[in-house]
């Protein structure tokens, strides 16, 4: 009895000691959560200023300097049992304060910890931690929010000063006056930093057109249109007779009319619409073609098919002005789409976006006759669709939290923080997805689901490991291995493009991987069937199945001849994906596949058999995922499409032809023109990635020639602002379509998503639907030299742009206001001349405001009565509904 009592007392004492330690750790975490964080980018050209970036192992020997400042606002913190986790899309190469170390955890997640030399965070004082970081950081969104403090046994907590989407709250502006040269990647960067003065010069040729010149103008531009003098008043509503338009499509288009103030009633303006396929010949014999005749007493639409009726009605909606009046021009139009494939791609894997935002996007896609919704439903950072029978995919793979074992969730990424919120977590239920497909189908939009494999598959891999663990513990070994995506023998050391380890890659050699893919295809196909839109295209993904450390920007530490412009690492410690997988080694030994590099394309061929077996006629992929397949005929599906995403100035103007000549349907998806996660302009206050270009604004997208890629060398520059030349000596069968991409690494909220998509969706739709007169026919061997050749009719291009910009600025943005779309408002250009303010804007018709008191009060700018100003002046633009404003910027006063 005495022994029992003593042991009980000892256990209680140990328990109390543990609780005391845990409480102490929680106290430290709580203190750290109130620290003030400042992240200051100091020098983006560190290699030119004494830092040996090559020796640090930086890709392409490129690195930058940053200073992290942590300010403790309360009592001294002495303990060492803590860590601060933070998100950095750039790898940390060195820490120049020996009291701290930084460890890469996974993806963009890093851990800051004390070393043995750590003394304390003194009370009410700041501690600076200089670091060297890979590549560059030249836009504000290179900095990620929601750093958090953690300690074993304590609840992790977000550091409050970083818990914001206003990144300026904890990250300083780029160093130097007007950013100095820090906004440049290299000293030879020839881009033009956009400020109010440079913007004013850029906008100088975009004059405001009178409303009379916009009358009868439709976006996207019809093939043929004749505008008449009379107007039609739709204020009493419309009466639609369209027996060939199904109920769901009719309801969708009438909803759009209603949103713009035009009701449906029997006594309204009559519109009669019918399908008459035999009436269309030649280029007009295409899905979506229509003839529209708007007369004083009624309108008639004759269409090739149901979508033609829908688009004819959308053209009538396009004519409605923004001033609230309901008068539209009478006209005759003949119209058909340029490309069969006109798409928006949305990534909900990296960060989740709500069903409401997706439905709002589908509404606007239909308004501008975009007909393919490429839905990126999975990636390393998240799995976003419910799959019956595989609950871990959403129970684990759709959530983020601070679980270092990743048994209950994925670790935080991309600024999501530890609390499973801020759009890091989320998924669409089966019912949600069916609703989305139904909604799209009613708007003549095909939903193309993408489950990205074999790379970018970490969410799926981790989820299926959780499933394996659960069933293995239950003694169900066969069931546990049924959908496992990792070969347990594979201990390859690999680094994915987003800095994940081997868990980023689904193993393409396992039968269980094929069973998994087959299961997912089957379940999603069933959802499509229930939604009334049979699945006709499956997107395989396929991109970036490689080890970035074995890429061209690195060299081995033992190489005889080293190059200063490459990162030096021990490449003997790096493996190709799946190199140590015994099942893959056996496949290669048995001659089933040539080598490890060929595995992704081999797996694509295998998946195409599954796709075909489900009755799906087309497989689609990012082109690099199919690079080792002989040609499109090698696949089991009837057709194979590729999203072509080589940048033009790095040779894409030529390599696109290779894919088309191998029989693939080439969808132009170039990052340097139609990646809408890239910035609108060269200014650090904009958001987005920039590895393919420093900017893509509405004007650049409008001027893009998607069916004559070399032509673009005359109308744009490369990433560093330099002219480039382009030609191809190969045949070009032509593009199958055009797609605008919104990847979500830096896009966490729905508002941010809409900021990046709109208004760039409008010129994308214009180029996808309408071929302009200044777009030249492709000619094999014809060379376009930027700054030298003058083949493109620049006068005609600029005239078209001015008209388009006025339609968008004066009319279309007001419609987006009514739809609740959080589009980007362009920042005005401005300068002060002889004491008077002169201002302009890229999209004429928008309201420009100025402030002479530091933003305390604002006045409307009137170009006809330029105001006299003194001292510092700020400008901004305002939405038509007065509810939103652009970024405000100061005007240079000379």
Image: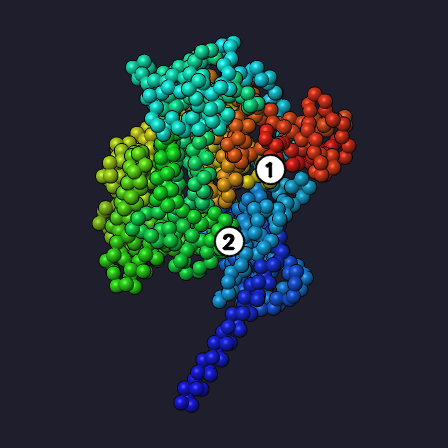
Q: Nearer the viewer, residue 883 or 391?
A: 883
The disc at residue 417 is 2
Q: Secondary structure at mark 2?
A: loop
Residue 90: percent from the left, percent from the top? 51, 49
Please name the residue shown 30% across and 64% down the image.
473
Above or below, 576 against 796 in this view is below
Q: Could you tell me if residue 721 is visible in this image?
A: yes
Please name the residue shown 59% across and 29% down the image.
880
Disc 2 residue crowd, few under 14, some 14–19, many 20+, Cα 10 Å? many
Of circles 1 and 2, which is in front? Answer: 2
Seen as rendered, the residue at the extreme front is 267
Please state if 763 lies on the left or on the right of 208 as rendered: left
Residue 816: percent from the left, percent from the top? 52, 30
Q: Secondary structure at mark 1?
A: loop
Q: Which residue is mark 1?
A: 683
Quarter of the rendering containing residue 343: top left
Q: Nearer the viewer, residue 294 or 492?
A: 294
**In which quadrant will I find the C terminus?**
top right
Please name the residue shown 44% across and 38% down the image.
358
Q: Nearer the viewer, residue 489 or 443?
A: 443
Quarter of the rendering containing residue 444: top left
Above or below, 396 against 706 in this view is below
Q: Could you tell me if residue 551 is visible in this image?
A: no
What's the CA distance linking mark 1 and mark 2?
27 Å
The disc at residue 799 is none
Residue 680: percent from the left, percent from the top? 55, 34
């Amino acid at each position: 009895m005495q022994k029992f009592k003593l042991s009980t007392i000892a256990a209680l004492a140990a328990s109390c000691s543990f609780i005391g330690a845990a409480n102490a750790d929680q106290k430290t975490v709580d203190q750290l959560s109130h620290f003030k964080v400042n992240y200051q980018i100091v020098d983006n050209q560190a290699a030119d200023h004494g830092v040996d970036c090559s020796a640090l192992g930086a890709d392409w020997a490129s690195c930058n300097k940053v200073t992290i400042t942590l300010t403790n606002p309360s009592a001294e913190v002495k303990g060492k049992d803590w860590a601060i986790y933070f998100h950095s899309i750039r790898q940390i190469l060195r820490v120049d304060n020996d009291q701290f170390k930084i460890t890469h955890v996974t993806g963009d997640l890093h851990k800051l910890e004390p070393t043995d030399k750590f003394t304390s965070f003194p009370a009410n004082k700041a501690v600076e931690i200089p670091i060297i970081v890979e590549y560059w950081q030249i836009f504000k969104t290179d900095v990620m929010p929601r750093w958090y403090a953690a300690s074993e046994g304590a609840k992790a907590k977000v550091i409050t000063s970083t818990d914001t989407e206003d990144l300026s709250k904890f990250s300083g502006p780029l160093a130097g006056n007007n950013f100095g040269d820090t906004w440049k990647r290299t000293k030879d960067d020839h881009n033009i930093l956009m400020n109010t003065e440079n913007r004013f010069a850029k906008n100088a040729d975009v004059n405001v057109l009178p409303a009379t010149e916009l009358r009868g103008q439709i976006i996207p531009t019809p093939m043929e249109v004749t505008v008449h003098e009379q107007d039609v008043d739709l204020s009493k509503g419309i009466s639609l007779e369209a027996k060939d338009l199904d109920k769901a499509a009719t309801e969708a288009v009438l909803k759009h009319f209603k949103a713009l103030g035009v009701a449906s009633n029997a006594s309204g303006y009559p519109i009669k619409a019918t399908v008459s396929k035999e009436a269309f010949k030649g280029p007009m014999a295409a899905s979506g073609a229509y003839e529209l005749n708007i007369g004083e007493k009624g309108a008639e639409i004759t269409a090739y098919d149901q979508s033609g009726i829908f688009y004819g009605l959308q053209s009538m909606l396009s004519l409605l002005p923004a001033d609230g009046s309901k008068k539209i021009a009478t006209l005759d139009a003949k119209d058909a789409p340029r490309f069969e494939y006109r798409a928006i791609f949305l990534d909900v894997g990296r960060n989740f976006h709500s069903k409401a935002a997706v439905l709002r996007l589908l509404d606007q896609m239909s308004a501008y006759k975009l007909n393919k919704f490429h839905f990126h439903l999975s990636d390393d950072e998240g799995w976003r669709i419910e799959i019956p029978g595989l609950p871990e995919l959403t129970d684990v793979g759709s959530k983020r939290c601070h679980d270092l074992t990743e048994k209950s969730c994925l670790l935080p990424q991309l600024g999501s923080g530890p609390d499973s919120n801020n759009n890091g977590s989320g998924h669409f239920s089966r019912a949600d997805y069916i609703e989305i497909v139904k909604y799209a189908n009613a708007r003549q939009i095909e939903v193309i689901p993408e489950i990205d494999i074999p790379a970018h598959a970490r969410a799926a891999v981790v989820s299926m490991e959780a499933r394996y663990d659960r069933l293995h513990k239950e003694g169900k070994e066969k069931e546990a291995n049924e959908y496992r995506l990792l070969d347990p023998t594979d201990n390859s050391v690999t680094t994915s493009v987003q800095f994940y380890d081997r868990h980023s890659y689904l193993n393409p050699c396992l039968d269980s991987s094929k069973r998994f893919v087959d299961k997912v295809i089957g379940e999603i196909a069933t959802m499509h069937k229930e939604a009334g839109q049979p699945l006709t295209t499956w997107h395989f993904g396929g991109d970036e199945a490689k080890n970035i450390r074995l890429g061209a920007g690195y060299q081995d530490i033992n190489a005889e001849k080293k190059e200063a412009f490459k990162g030096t690492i021990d490449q003997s410690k790096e493996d190709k994906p799946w190199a140590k997988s015994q099942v893959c080694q056996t496949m290669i030994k048995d001659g089933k596949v040539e080598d490890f590099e060929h595995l992704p394309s081999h797996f694509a061929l295998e998946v195409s058999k599954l796709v075909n077996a489900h009755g799906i006629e087309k497989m689609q992929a990012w082109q690099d995922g199919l690079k080792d397949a002989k040609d499109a005929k090698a696949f089991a599906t009837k057709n194979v499409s590729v999203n072509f995403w080589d940048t033009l100035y790095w040779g894409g103007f030529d390599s696109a032809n290779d894919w088309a000549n191998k029989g693939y349907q080439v969808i132009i998806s170039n990052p340097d023109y139609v990646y809408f996660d890239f910035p609108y302009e060269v200014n650090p206050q904009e958001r987005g990635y920039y590895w393919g270009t420093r900017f893509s604004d509405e004007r650049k997208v409008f001027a893009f020639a998607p069916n004559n890629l070399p032509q673009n060398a005359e109308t744009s520059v490369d990433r560093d602002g330099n002219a480039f030349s382009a030609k191809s000596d190969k045949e070009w069968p032509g593009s199958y379509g055009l797609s605008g991409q919104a990847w979500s690494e830096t896009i966490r909220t729905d508002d941010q998503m809409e900021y990046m998509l709109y208004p760039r969706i409008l010129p994308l739709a214009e180029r996808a639907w309408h071929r302009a007169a200044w777009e030249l026919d492709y000619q094999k061997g014809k060379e376009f030299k930027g700054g030298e050749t003058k083949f493109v009719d620049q006068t005609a291009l600029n005239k078209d742009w001015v008209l388009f910009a006025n339609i968008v600025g004066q009319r279309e943005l007001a419609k987006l206001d009514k739809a609740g779309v959080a589009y980007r408002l362009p920042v005005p250009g401005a300068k002060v001349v002889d004491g008077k303010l002169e201002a302009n804007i890229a999209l004429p018709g928008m309201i420009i405001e100025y402030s002479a008191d530091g933003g305390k009060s604002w006045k409307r700018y009137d170009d006809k009565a330029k105001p006299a100003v003194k001292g510092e002046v700020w400008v901004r633009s305002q939405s038509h509904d007065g509810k939103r404003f652009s970024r405000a910027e100061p005007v240079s006063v000379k």
